[in-house]
Amino acid sequence: MRSTPRLPPGARMVIHGLIVVCACSCSSVLSTSKTDATTQVSSDAPLGKDQADAPTTLDAFREDLPREGPAPDQAPLPADPAPERFGISIDPANPAGNPTAQQLKLAGVRWVRVEWKSSSGHSLYDPSIAALRAAKLKVLLLLDYASAPGKPASSASSGEWSTYLQTFDSTLDAIAAHYGDGVDAWQIWNEPDLPAQPGYDPGVPAVHYGKMLLAAVTTIHKHSTRPVITGGMASGDPGYLTQATQAAALTADAVAVHPYGQRAPDGWPTTGWGFGEMSALLKAYLAFGKPVWISEIGTNDSSSPTFQADYLENVYTLTKSAFGAKVPVVFWFCWSDGMVPPYGIVDAGGQPKPAYVRYQTLAGSW
């Protein structure tokens, strides 16, 4: 019997006072000893300002909250008639994590989440983003420590953080000026609320993250009309975001969460599995008065051949039926086991897993 989901090395989560291991979207490993806080970013002209895109679902946020989701033994649903919520994490810098637009559309994907890494730069991301958007796929561009190297340790002094925030905002300004409306949404940081562990320290003190986010929204909106969302909150503790918003106003368009290890629907698969109920966690973050985007969710529980597929279906069913437009987008983590095994919906060789078939059934190829 599972008492907690088995989560991979790479990040840590603080859930109700417990520290547990969780998945991370980013393949880059941080070094807290870096001293170069300067990142050179191309000043090429903006891309795709006039590209056609479908509107986001943020304006629908005021819908009433429906009841809780379906029973766990519900039969698979038909393809969603409004499938905009189906997103997935990819990694153009990793051949195994870089599917073609055609492959993504065949799976039913509508949104992709891409981390912009300075080590790869515009020569990689420009053609990749252009090809995705030409195929009418929407792109959430994640900007974080991999975009602006030199991040201080989460325990660094206030002075070190103040210096880095200036570097980060300058980097962000150049990237936003380059892409303009050529992406569909922007995400500021990855898992800023997690504590440090060896090899992975994404944490930003709450007071500094509040300032980072406020400045980022202002900077991006100089160049882009697209929505800006927070970093994916992964600790399970909304108190971090409360502290951040006490330091600076929450002007982002949506709050993002990474609800790993949360039961969906309530009590599934057992009341002893995981760290809490996903429905309760989503409601806690909705209390900030913004839509909630799930910018990562997945599982490496392999207790049965179909567990990953069942959990995937339950998450999408819960967010659609119980939250609707309040939780408009869910990015499954991730495309391939070649990114972070065994989280992919395809294996490292690109062959579909049961989770792929379930995702495609729910979303519908297009």
Image: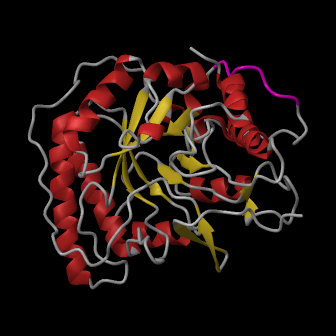
In the image, residue 161 sits, relative to residue 305, either above or below, namely: below
| Rendered location of residue 246, percent (x, y) | 40, 71
Residue 130 seen anywhere in this rendered image of the structure: yes
- Magenta-span inclusion, residue 250: no
| Rendered location of residue 18, percent (x, y) | 66, 79
- The residue at 48%/35% (across/down) is 58
Say which of 77 and 6 sits in front.
6
The secondary structure that most of the magenta stretch takes on is loop
> Which segment is the magenta one?
75-81
Question: Quadrant where the C terminus lies?
Answer: top right
How are the residues colored? secondary structure
- The answer to which image quadrant residue 151 occupies is bottom left
In the image, residue 324 sits, relative to residue 13, either above or below, namely: above
In the image, residue 79 sits, relative to residue 18, either above or below, namely: above
In the image, residue 67 sits, relative to residue 26, either above or below, namely: above
Question: Quadrant where the N terminus lies?
Answer: bottom right
- The residue at 58%/57% (across/down) is 285
- The residue at 70%/36% (across/down) is 355
Residue 236 seen anywhere in this rendered image of the structure: no
Question: Which residue is outermost to the front?
Answer: 349
Say which of 134 and 124 sits in front.
124
Say which of 83 and 302 sits in front.
302
- The residue at 43%/24% (across/down) is 55
